[in-house]
Image (cartoon, rainbow, N blue to C red):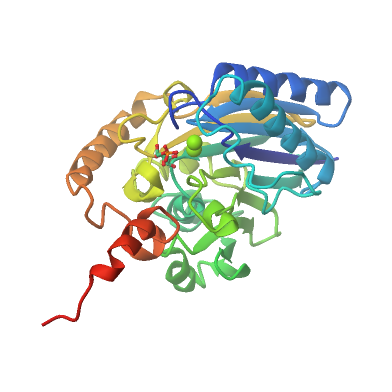
Amino acid sequence: MKITVSLIKADVGSLAGHHVVHEKQKELARKILQEAKETGLIIDYYVFNAGDDLELLMTHTKGVNNSDIHGLAWKVFKEVTDKVSKPLKLYAAGQDLLVEAFSGNLRGMGPGVAEMEFEERPSEPIVVFAADKTEPGAWNLPLFKIFADPFNTAGLVIDPRMHDGFDFVVMDVIENKEVKLRCPSEMYDLLALIGTPGRYVISRVYRHSDGEIAAVASTTRLSLIAGRYVGKDDPVLIVRAQHGFPAVGEILEAFAFPHLVAGWMRGSHHGPLMPVSLRNAKCTRFDGPPRVVALGFQVHEGYLEGPADLFDDPAFDWTRMRAMEIADYIRRHGPFMPHRLGPEEMEYTTLPAVLEKLKNRFVEAK
Ligand code: F6R
Ligand code: MG
Ligand code: MG
């Protein structure tokens, strides 16, 4: 039996600014998904949050891009907006719902989607990641490390099942095109693209030897859909682990380095991506720093056993301390680049409106 894992998320309003999802929002989401479980539409679900983003993890047998599943997620986001966010006047109620009505597929409508379909292995561990205050390109560096860097993933060298490497699908989010590149043979081509994470985003990874899906990420760039700034995309990612895929520890190892990502305050600043437990998945200092949670599950006949809150571990304390040191350092740049994003990225923020005001004050330089 083929199982589909769908991780669909949206920011539909939050408590005390863009800080954290309200408990009542999660309660209502659980209630709606429980009903869908009882009617048999989905097999199982897990509701959680990464900062101000409501995350719906669902399993079913309907394949990816299924309109019933996408419709269910849309219903959750709509009802949570109408029945909780708006009455409680939560901040930015319904923020990511960019259109009025659902029309069959969530892509291009605001919510972020990562979905994969596979034949369950005798044991099927998966790791689900969700980040807040950053963009989909934030996964580029860790995905490269997990599936292409032998200094991160020992299995690339030691395990014959991984020795043929992995194929990366990279999406150009500006042109809406994609290209598949094989690693290690096309590693330099891959890096030439994904080093520009605002434009080239890894969307899927496959094991080269048999084409098995290994990872899938959301690629929504809200500003490109809306043509204006509507909060960062706060991406999600699903990775299969163990037995011919990287081990859970190899997957997590890629996050031991708090790399710089775009997002943070007003979606306009670079800052370190800090791995945190679910308990600490809430953005405070300067609306950040950008955070990521990792949840481990064992999938069995489509049921989700778990989660294991994988960053809830002192082994990541040092990474967190380092992230705060970097946060402190880069914050001292205030409104200066490279803390503030470059002009290309700022195009979709409120900065152009400020610059427009100054336009007529410019005279020929003497
Ligand atoms: C970043 C984010 C926040 C807001 C900031 C201003 O993704 O959501 O940093 O950009 O709090 O929010 P507004 O302009 O909505 O009051
Ligand atoms: Mg928000
Ligand atoms: Mg968010």
Q: Residue at x 64, y 42 (%)?
A: 97
Q: State which quarter of the image contains the C terminus.
A: bottom left
Ligand 1 position by quadrant: top left
Q: Please state if 297 lies on the left or on the right of 261 as rendered.
A: right
* Residue 307: quarter of image: top right
Q: Do we see residue 210 in this rendering? A: yes
Q: Residue at x 75, y 25 (%)?
A: 33
Looking at this rendering, what residue extends furthest in the right direction?
39
Q: Position of residue 31 (x, y in %)?
A: 73, 18
Q: Residue at x 45, y 57 (%)?
A: 348
* Most foreground residue, 327 or 185: 327
* Most foreground residue, 96 or 184: 96
Q: Do we see residue 164 in this rendering? A: no
Looking at this rendering, what residue extends furthest in the left direction?
366
Q: Position of residue 158 (x, y in %)?
A: 50, 52
- Above or below for 173 versus 24: below
Looking at this rendering, what residue extends furthest in the front direction?
360
Q: Residue at x 68, y 52 (%)?
A: 213
Q: Please state if 334 lies on the left or on the right of 126 as rendered.
A: left
Q: Position of residue 112 (x, y in %)?
A: 62, 45
